[in-house]
Amino acid sequence: MMNKLIKYYIVVLFLIVLTGCNKANNAKPKEVVTPFNAQVDSLMALMTLQEKIGQTVMYSGGWSITGPTVSSDNKKYIKEGSVGAMLNVYSAKGTRELQKMAVEETRLGIPLLFGYDVIHGFRTIFPINLGLAASWDLNDIQKGARIAAEEASAEGIHWTFAPMVDIGRDPRWGRISEGAGEDVYLGSKIAKAYVKGFQGDDLSKHNTILACAKHFVGYGAAQAGRDYHTVNMGHDELRNVYLPPFEAAVDAGVETFMTAFNELNGVPATGNKFIFQDILRNEWKFNGFVVTDYTAINELVEHGFAENEKHATELAIKAGIDQDMMSSANRLYLEELINEGKVDVSLVNNACRKILLTKYKLGLFDDPYRYSDEKREKEVVYKAEFLEAARKSAAMSTVLLKNNKALPLNNKQTIALIGPLVKDKENIIGNWAAAGDRKGKAISIYQGIHEYLSASKIVYAKGCEIEDFDMSNFEKAINIAKKVDKVVMVLGEDYDMSGEAASRTNIKLPGRQTDLIRAIRKAVPNKQIVLVLMNGRPLDLSEEDNLVDAILETWFPGTSGGYGVADVLFGTYNPSGKLPVTFPRTVGQIPIYYNMKNTGRPIPPRNPKQDYKSNYIDVPNTPLYPFGHGLSYTNFEYSEVQLSATSIKFSDTLTVSAEITNIGDVDGYEIAQLYVHDKVGSITRPVKELKGFKKIYLKKGESQTVSFTLTVENLKFYNNHEFVTEPGEFEVAIKGTSDFDFKQTFTLN
Ligand code: BGC
């Protein structure tokens, strides 16, 4: 036999030549327009069909479990060259060992790709994504993703399964916590910020990682908010609401896409040619690779779309899916399907090519270990500046929902700190917290407040647990409430009550927490109570809104959350967050979002119910807290909008401006929001649509004119797959919330 060793040396020699080309290319990057194609061609010429299929296979290292594990013998598969990527593996040492196996013990030495769910930070955990979205601060979100990439890349991660850009309009759905909320415009901007943050400006750098736009598509529209459930939607909603954030990710250069678990109009996403071929590849010209969600190929059988797993494998590759996460389907059935003539070998070649190209782009053929860097890992992870950035993000993400002069706190008051989340370090970092530490590293709200107030001014009682129904500790909490100047209650959900497979039908505070507020309110009727919330979804706070004087929504604010939240509570950071998602009055209003359609029988906003109109007989149509809402410790006054013209042609642009004045007593940030309403359309248009926003800083008494430029592009929408502009009348406004009535119009002719 031409023994294995000789073959190995031929290959190594060959790879050295490739590597040389690669380095030469790196020396003059500008001239290399389509790098690595030649290298991939040469490498693929050496590969067997099984090895090519191997590149389309991903297994979990099981270092964190996200779902049912299919394969138990990953090492064997790696050595055979039957695996192209691993997920749930991390640490410089661990990934280096695995990589060594792929590079030194396989026939061709092709490096593995290591993927991980780096969702809102890797070790230094930022607020959950819904919270980050509430900052409306694109620079900050991008910076957070950059930091996550810095940390993750040092621990061997090449690829994050983020951002999740699914629009979420149903607070029952647990994964609403992972997205940017309900709005298309905001969601699209945020999608870009994440992609740029993770991928940086050059993928060949050792501190940039691949991003992954997920879950394509419609995952957030699961029926009844139940995870993985059926999705039915027309082209209007698909095109105008659910697709744009994905397209934005493509525009930002996202390298990979992930399929959704759900079916879309009867066709499960993982077998859906329309979305992957017609839209993603043909329309959007995406040329990265597509990975399935966890075991999603096998699930085509349960969906009732494939007869068996072999059939599912055929359907997935034919739909344009390149890599199989955890189904074992490609490994077990692809070769057979090709031999039987059911699958064209070109599909495997294409998938393998895209995956190899990506590995080249990351520089893994230059140095397969460049990401697994123990020295860098030590220097980078939990860097002081990262923890400081997380503190700022936590402050910027909080939303002051209500404030009856109870906030900010001052350091002369005595305070009773009450609630199961006061001293918590486990929940505060939220769900999908990658390799974040749920014990030592996180800063609790108690610790944060302690920075501002001496221990002698704080008394603490837990009062109750988050989820159980025991009220035996109420008394202690009531007693301390009686002895202080002000009560601060820190309540909310457990971190795992949101995220994947964590849908709720009841979106109130769990357990006895509302009873605890009630009991304390009764005991101290005239004392101010501040409610600090941690939760992964909009909650029904109708009762709490009546019981307390201030509500600060902090989501799950992350590793430095305690400090960031205390900065807001004491006014070091004047809250500027605005809701990226509507808070309903009751679960019965769901779905409820600001840019609904008018119906043929609308009632004017804020009006009481009327007979035979589109309203409920028991609650108003309006939410408790609308999209875009968020208070500050100061007040901002908006002038009526000024328009550069009241009538524009298709080729014109329109400048819309408003003067904003800080009329309160303290300096602060405001997020000015531009809304438009297209009054008549060939298909009906939403009552309001966000078309721009700006975060400005105004000292007390200061004014600033904020201007936006609208073009015809901003007014387009999809009607039956056509992106159209229609002449007519539009309403326009600039406000600090979505809750307002339009006063100005312009026409487009
Ligand atoms: C989730 C994905 C995630 C994957 C890998 C799945 O259960 O739906 O969002 O990226 O697991 O952990």
Image: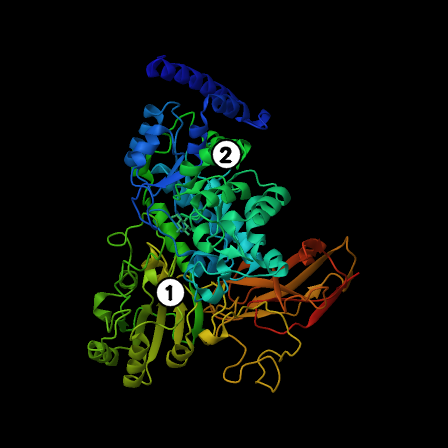
Percent across and percent down for residue 321 are 51, 42
Q: Residues within 10 Å of mark 1 (few under 14, many from 20)?
A: many
Q: Toward the viewer: 155 or 74?
A: 74
Q: Nearer the viewer, mark 2 or mark 1?
A: 2
Residue where numbered disc 1 is placed: 535
| Residue 148 versus residue 456 in the image, above or below | above
Under circle 1, the secondary element is: loop
Kind of residue at badge 2: Glu
Q: Residue furthest bottom?
A: 611
For marks 2 and 1, give the CA distance. Answer: 52 Å
Kind of residue at badge 1: Asn
Percent across and percent down for residue 106 are 35, 25
Residue where numbered disc 2 is placed: 340
Q: Is residue 602 visible?
A: yes
| Residue 162 versus residue 493 in the image, above or below | above
Numbered label attached to residue 420? none
Disc count in the image? 2
Mark found first going from the N terminus, 2 or 1: 2
Q: Toward the viewer: 572 or 482?
A: 482
Percent across and percent down for residue 671 are 53, 62
Q: Look at the numbered disc 2 and say if its residue's Cβ is closer than 8 Å to ligand 1.
A: no
Quadrant (top left/top right/bottom left/bottom right) for the C terminus: bottom right
Under circle 2, the secondary element is: loop
Q: Look at the numbered disc 1 and say if its residue's Cβ is closer than 8 Å to ligand 1.
A: no
Left or right: residue 661 versus residue 82 is right
| Residue 253 versus residue 499 in the image, above or below | above
Q: Is residue 256 visible?
A: no
| Residue 197 versus residue 596 in the image, above or below | above
Residue ID at (44%, 16%)? 14
Q: Toward the viewer: 447 or 216?
A: 216
